[in-house]
Image (cartoon, rainbow, N blue to C red):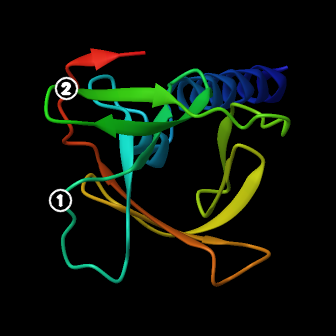
Amino acid sequence: MRNSKCQLIILNKIYIIFFLISCFRPYNEQLIAPKKNNYWDIAYMYKESYSSPFYCFNFKQNGECFYYYYKIDSISKVRLLYDFEDVIVPNTWKIYNNNTIQIQGVIYNIKLITEKQMILVNQKFSKDSLHLVPSKVETSKMK
């Protein structure tokens, strides 16, 4: 009888530990979709710095992901949702095993994720890589 009580107590503790672990979002997910700025500009790896990004991703905490382009003129800066026309693109993102991320249906290996940058390499086409940096673009109008 004493053994069964001990086993039951141990099982309950294990259950509580797994429950608590499942309540926390993985660290990489917290970096990608923070509560404040979850827009990541596409920077080009061959440039040391970039002045005006042209495209960005918006990663939401609920797993949604949207692709935008910037329309910048002398009067305003606008972030517009990219129209893929007749191509159906899933507006989702998800991390697998902390080393792989799927963004809008494309799977990338994670080379680096920090608060300042993400370096991702396409699993199928290794020359297709993304270098993302947190957006610093102040838009005057959002669409």
Q: Does 139 appear above or below 42? A: above
Q: Looking at numbered disc 1 in the image, what kind of residue is underneath it?
A: Ser
Instruction: Give the number of the mark in front: 2 or 1.
Output: 2
Secondary-structure class at tag 2? loop
* Quadrant location of the N terminus in the rendered image: top right
Q: Residue at x 78, y 47 (%)?
A: 105
Question: For the residues marked 2 and 1, what is the alpha-carbon distance in whole angstroms?
Answer: 16 Å
Q: Which residue is drawn at 74% across and 55% down?
A: 106
* Crowdedness near tag 1: few (<14), some (14–19) or many (≥20) residues, C-alpha within 10 Å: few
Relative to the observer, which residue lies in front, 86 or 98?
A: 86
Secondary-structure class at tag 1? loop
Q: Looking at numbered disc 2 in the image, what kind of residue is underneath it?
A: Ser
Relative to the observer, which residue lies in front, 19 or 97?
A: 97
x, y percentage for residue 82? 58, 34
Left or right of residue 18: residue 137 = left
Q: Does 2 appear above or below 49? A: above
- The dot on residue 76 is 2
Q: Which of marks 2 and 1 is nearer the N terminus?
A: 1
x, y percentage for residue 41? 36, 49
Left or right of residue 26: residue 136 = left
* Quadrant location of the C terminus in the rendered image: top left
- The dot on residue 12 is none
* Crowdedness near tag 2: few (<14), some (14–19) or many (≥20) residues, C-alpha within 10 Å: few
Q: Does 121 appear above or below 100? A: below
- The dot on residue 51 is 1
Q: Which residue is drawn at 27% across and 16% down?
A: 141
2 and 1 marks in contact (CB < 8 Å): no
x, y percentage for residue 88? 84, 35
Quadrant in the picture for residue 119 = bottom left
Quadrant in the picture for residue 48 = bottom left
- Which residue sits furthest front? 74
